[in-house]
Image (spheres, rainbow, N blue to C red):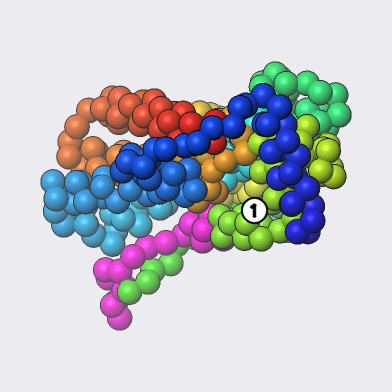
Amino acid sequence: MANESDNYEAVVQAKRAENVAEFTDDRKGVLAHIQHALHVNPALVPLFVLLVSIVVFGLLLGSKFFSPFALTLILQQVQIVGIVAAAQSLVILTAGIDLSVGAIAVLSSVIMGQFTFRYGMPVEVAVALGLAFGTVVGSINGWLVAVMKLPPFIVTLGMWQIVLAANFLYSANETIRSQDIEADAPLLQFLGTTFKIGADAEGRGGATFTYGVIAMVLIFAVLVYVLSQTAWGRHVYAVGDDPEAAQLSGVNVRGTLISVYAVTGFICAIAGWALIGRIGSVSPTSGQLLNIESITAVVIGGISLFGGRGSILGPLFGALIVGVFTLGLRLAGADAQWTFLLIGVLIIGAVTVDQWIRKVSA
């Protein structure tokens, strides 16, 4: 593993040396040190923004915001976006983008519901088939990008349209009601099941969580380990940084890209399962903004749209930032448009910071 990593670094350095003259970097100022620190730890910016926004809303709203109910409500509200953002992050780390993530999540949830109620399959089998569907669609995206050499934007834009149309055609635009799911297939709503921590003997107070929140945290924890401690994770960053150099150093670029899109589809299917639990029903019209919301969380989270750089924890912080702003402004009685305005400012600011940080390695 070490030799492979050393080979990749050597190839990258050799390629850069062909085009960039050597020079001595004499920058010693505070800004240079901050720039370097953010380059090494890109998740620091969204973490700082998250903490500042929590403190500001806490000071403005007091106990109305700083309560176990309000803070855990934020987690519940961002769980779907957070899971999809984790999936989107993997693709963006390879310098790609996936516009089909939301459609995959929704159709996966529809498949779980329809196979349970239309075909009478055991709910466990239906859930497994929904997860398999997401993985297969992601693999097709990966094959078109890696083998056919088609642009990720075009591939996933087309797949988004295909899956979205298939969703409405297959479901006949019918919603499976919450009451039917509760009575006959409660496992479909499992990730929406709530439980309390810190409540008194009568169940009052405390923090309320859902198993969907736990799933989101576990997904991010697994990805943190995989991306930082395994060869596959190093390959993902290498492909996003410079696919040609990665190929020359022995990385299977095609296999890595296909696997990234496959894992992305699988995680999106989990988001579809969590979506059933969140809204209580199986609706083909749900999750229509997941594509944009996931990209927003990833960009605010500090993952570079140019690939090869960023912390997987950043999108989690990005999703939480959006949740904090949304709930904080709602509790303050502000117009909902202020949320979109501030999030737009954050997106532009995040891209600006990313460009500034990239100058460290330029």
Q: Answer with left or right where residue 314 lies relative to residue 91.
A: left
Q: Is residue 313 magenta?
A: no
Which residue is pictured at 79% across the width and 56% down the height? 3
Q: Is residue 203 magenta?
A: yes
Instruction: Evaluate whether residue 145 shows in this view.
Output: yes
Quarter that holds the N terminus: bottom right
Q: Which residues are magenta?
A: 199-218
**Residue lying farthest bottom?**
201
What x and y, as percent, mark residue 361?
54, 36
Q: Answer with left or right where residue 24 lies relative to residue 2.
A: left
Asked if residue 186 is positioned above or below residue 257 in the image, the reply reads below
What x and y, as percent, mark residue 24?
50, 36
Which of 40/175 is in front?
A: 40
Instruction: Evaluate whether residue 84 shows in this view.
Output: no
Which of 70/91 is in front?
A: 91
**Residue annotated with mark 1:** 227
Tell me which corner region of the image, top left, top right, bottom left or bottom right, holds residue 38.
top left
Asked if residue 73 is positioned above or below residue 325 in the image, the reply reads below
Which of 130/239 is in front?
A: 239
Which residue is pictured at 74% across the width and 55% down the height? 231
Q: Answer with left or right where residue 15 lies relative to residue 192.
A: right
Which residue is pictured at 48% across the width and 31% down the height? 359
Which of 190/335 is in front?
A: 335
Identify the secondary structure beneath mark 1: helix
What x and y, as percent, mark residue 155?
73, 22
What amino acid is found at the position of numbered circle 1 in the picture?
Answer: Leu
Which residue is pictured at 71% across the width and 27% down the height? 18
